[in-house]
Image (tube, rainbow, N blue to C red):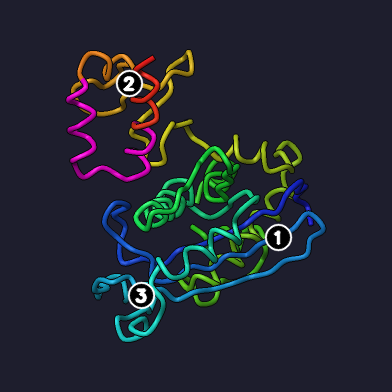
Amino acid sequence: MNLKLHKPLCTFDLETTGINISKDRIVEICILKVNPDASRESKTWLVNPEMLIPKESSAIHGITDEKVKDAPTFREIAPKIQEMISGCDLAGFNSNRFDVPLLAEEFLRVGLDFDLNKFKLVDAQTIFHKMEQRNLSAAYKFYCGKTLENAHSAEADVLATFEVLDAQVGRYEDLPKDVAGLSDFSFHSKFADLAGMIHFDENNKEIFAFGKYKGQKVKEVFQKDLGYYAWIQNADFPLYTKKVLTGIQLRSKF
């Protein structure tokens, strides 16, 4: 294994009802947990999303309403997922922009906390795009010399993603081999939240990246316009973004 792990790394993939982080739900999740000694375990869950799966989504991943009607809901399996990723770092393919934010929404929706500060996040797609510029099938062919069978099956995708990530570390001498370095490399920009709605300025202070206060410090906005915080909390923003803003709002009182 080319990766240098100081703690377990959970590579994971989601199949979902769609691509709206706030509204769509998980229908399948696979997690591959790789330990520093290279031992590994993998678990896959079908998930009842408690909503209809659009035909367009089923056409991509092959998961239908019929297939998940007797599957557990996310609320039922969330403690098992939380236990598996606890104390680990997280990796995926396009995970920083989609899988991690959507997983965070699912946890928060069922009343379980998801703290971004507890994880280093490594995105094999970002590394691929920075180093070679291309999708998972192409990355698998390029780095591993294999054809990806059953693409958009969570298990096939997650196994391929880990192989790609490990091969990337072995291929590029100037690429970090530890998760902390890979996590830094995986980000195009560093955001305070997962949806990219709260950025950091040059002094590492949170600023709005949207709306009438775009570019202004969040703490200062809340100190002069608390109604803006209330509006965001009642509007259709991702739950994790609301959580981050709540933390800043509480700090703004002092």
Residue at 67 percent across and 36 percent down: it is 181
Which sits in the foreground, 57 or 216?
A: 216
Residue 142 is left or right of residue 79, and the answer is right
Residue at 38%, 72% in the rendered image: 73
User: Callout 2: helix, strand or loop?
Assistant: helix
The magenta region covers: 226-245
Residue displayed at 65% across by 50% down:
87
Mark 3 / mark 2, whichever is N-terminal: 3
Q: Quadrant location of residue 216?
A: top left
Instruction: Tell me how far mark 2 sits from mark 1, CA to CA.
Output: 38 Å
Query: In this picture, is 44 found above or below 206?
Result: below
Q: Is residue 220 left or right of residue 8?
A: left
Please give the label number shown on residue 34: 1
**Magenta span contains residue 231:** yes
Chain-order first, disc 3 or disc 1: 1
Name the residue that disc number 2 marks. Answer: 218
Q: Secondary structure at mark 3?
A: loop
Q: Amino acid at mark 1?
A: Val
Sooner in the amino-acid sequence: mark 2 or mark 1: 1
Residue 137 in view: no
Q: Position of residue 66 (x, y in %)?
A: 31, 86
Spatial CA distance of label 3 from label 1 is 27 Å
Mark 3 sits on what residue? 48
